[in-house]
Amino acid sequence: MTAITNAIGFGMVTAAILAVATVAVTLQYSVTQVPNFAQGDIMTLGAYAAYQTQVFAPNLLLEAVVAIVVCALFSLGMNYSLIQWFQRRGTRNIIILVVTAAVSLILQNSILAFYGGAPVEFKLPATEPADYGPFRWTSRDIWIMVCAVLVMLSVHVILRYTKFGKSQRAVSDDPQLARVSGIDADRVINLTWLWAGAMTGLAGFILAASIGAFDPSFGFGFLLVILAAAVVGGIGQAYGAMLGALLIGVAMEVSAVYISSEYKQVVAFVILIAVLLLRPSGLIAARAKNVVY
Amino acid sequence: MPDAEIFLEVTHVAKNFGGVRAVVDGWLSVPKGTTVGLIGPNGAGKSTMIEMISGFLAPDSGKIILAGEEIQGKPAHQVAERGLIRTFQTPREWRGLTVMENMLLAADQKGRDAAWRAIFARRKLRAAEQLDRARARELLERFGLLALRDEFAGSLSGGQKRLLEFARIAMRSPRVVLLDEPCAGVNPVLQRNIEEAIVGLQQDGITVLLVEHNLPFVERACQDIYVMAQGTTIAEGSLAELRKVPAVIDAYLGEVEAIA
Amino acid sequence: MIDYAISLLTLALINAIIVIGLNVRWGWAGEFDLSYYAFVAIGAYTTAVLVGPPSGGPDPLVNPPDGWILGLHWPFIPSALIAMLVTGSLSAMLGAVALRKLRGDYFAITTVAFTFIVTLVFSQNFRLFNGFLGVFNIPQPFYDFLHQPDIFTYNLVFIGLCFVCLAIVYVVTEWLFKSPFGMTLRSIREDEQASAAYGRDVYIAKLKAFVIGGMVAGLGGSLFAVYLSSWNPSAWSPIEGFLIFAAIFLGGQGNVRGVILGVVIVTILIPESTRWLPEFQRRPDLYPALRNIAAGILILAVLRWRPQGIIPERHLNDTRASAGFRIPLLPQTRTPGA
């Protein structure tokens, strides 16, 4: 039983990291209708930004802040200069998807060109695992989960109680209607990307902090797990994203008890494909996509 | 028309969209070779009816019978293969293809578009294509679009696109046509062309179900009219008869195009 | 110098075959398919495994210890055909699952997932595919048959083989493109609902395109495997798959000539343009990274400034299409009621 509870414990930490990134993707998707294939690489960007900061001025908080700011600005720039341009011209969504994939390619390889392919080490203070009820966590794990919960709470508060949150929900429901009602949809979309970018940067920083060593491709590998969590939870639904992340995170770690850990990601993908086939609107249905023909 | 054979019949269909009851109880029947109108205020469920009849949505309950065969729940392409063609509220041409290609695509392929035929039956395909092209040219001429046949369909004006829709329908010569608000946002000249096109369909013996808001037009074109409101078919008859039905007047209260 | 030109030409030919297959899936059926390169790899592995000599020879590098090669030592052509069958069947399976209900972004995500899974399976399976080390020392086709000629002659023979394959693939896809089947696919790409409204079974048509594309991928992969005489998982990833998309965007979607031009630019011109730059000792990843960046920027530039590609899709002009047939161009009589 201990192996399973251990795994669930790990799973919850993974889920925490996943949740932050997934909510970011979900918010972006809700206003842009296209999943951002560069998401994983923006996480990598955050991780490397934190690493670079550490090289100059090792300070955990500073590193986190730099990661957040860099990714937020990058996301904003990506939307403002690229995505919005294509959307204004009524480009098909699938082309916009290709655009995000191109950005992913460019970003990942820029990092590769600059830092090289060998993994870089992110120095972390050593921590000892301790028992918390049935689970075994280090203080870092606790911090990660606390962080994630705070982010989730802030998302909830912003979406529900602020003017921006209400505008954001209006735009994601029906952009035309929102515009006609006087909401500056473009501004809301830009701010959403900024916000999502900030969260992605934080997720990248946290992931780097929990792994300790990474190379330029590590974010892209995570992308698929993020998308799995987003789809499972109901793509476009922020609350669904949290649920999806929890499910996928725990499933992945628990499965690692039974099968080789190389195949952990496969578990996420299998769940993804199963959900896509059986209930494409996700566990928390937003709008059902009616593909009848 | 008690003697005419009923060609398209819809009995008591319903459609629910996660809590929104778009259609509660819809029914109509269209005798063969006639034109029947479907009118009603916005949100009455008319478009959902079209979607269900044409196979783009499956009704939650009820039956749709085409020439004696039940087709409810069948996917759109199978319904089209059985001779029922529909239009959409905005003209849906294939934008990146030429007008002539649009016409060729509209023709009934009868299995010609199987992949293996492309390799092993090329001569027969080419001969069939030439016949299609000739017929397409005739029809384009009829609709005044012949000169545009090598233009991309996406570059046509709105009016030309609507006419292309009718040309494509004529190319297909279906048994039944569902027209979803063909005159929406259309200027009077174009509207006359569309009326002529519908008359042309009627002369060809095609059965037509017409959804429209323009009541004088509906009066001229249709032999029978159904009224829907709030998801239910509430009345049937000629426009003169319908004007006297209180439920119909109620439904149109507040509508700009009141029955005057 | 001649050797260099020959190797470039061979590479161009093989890449052209590969990109034609992708063009069937994207340019015709309109789906963003990131799993394509995985099928190339499957084709490569299948052929490699079938063509490999028996194990247990004196040199463990040439004939690795028992278990990882089937030892069939088949000739190339049947192996390639089997590879095409395998990739075609797997395409049918993936397509049946992914195309039935998914479109657009969901479909793309599923194909990426498929690629990851395939990568994992190949790199973890040591018995058949030798894991991340990959299969190497793959015998060259016709080598023994031609009594082991010198390298130069052999390279020419191999180019001939590639040429023949490309010609067959080109002709078959051109026929498909011009046929009602091809036009159906293009109409689906333009507007699926309208196509369904006119009687097209969208799912079946896309599935057929998917399988055809998969089979061509298998052929391309087979040729790649024997050309490089080795094949391992680092040779491909979703990124590689995405790069050949660059070729399609650049060249002009749906258009075989344009797509071949695109392939030449992306797989020949871009990599070769950095060949003569000085080597950075400690940065082996620099040039590949720069090339990928260039490809990515190229894709964005094309999408922004010339989305139809360098050579836009050809539409057969009606006058020319009707040339040589006795049916008159214009009707002689007017239809009544017009």
Image (cartoon, rainbow, N blue to C red):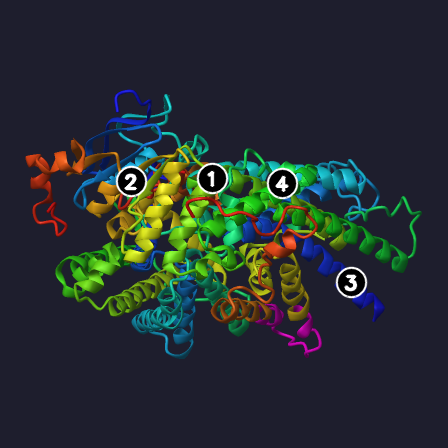
The circle on residue C7 is 3
User: Which residue is the site of mark 4?
Assistant: C87
What secondary structure is found at the residue carrying circle 3? helix
* Residue C106 position within the rendered picture, expressed as x and y whole percent measured from the top left: 41, 48
- Left or right, C310 with reference to B8: right
**Above or below C93: residue C243:** below
Q: CA distance from mark 2 to mark 4?
A: 48 Å
Q: Are marks 1 and 2 in contact (CB under 8 Å)?
A: no
In front here: B121 or A7? B121
Q: Amino acid at mark 1?
A: Arg
> Mark 4 falls within which chain?
C
Q: Nearer the viewer, mark 2 or mark 4?
A: 2
**Above or below A216: residue C64:** above
Whether residue C168 is in magenta: the answer is no
User: Which residue is the site of mark 1?
Assistant: B172
- Whether labels 1 and 3 belong to a single chain: the reply is no
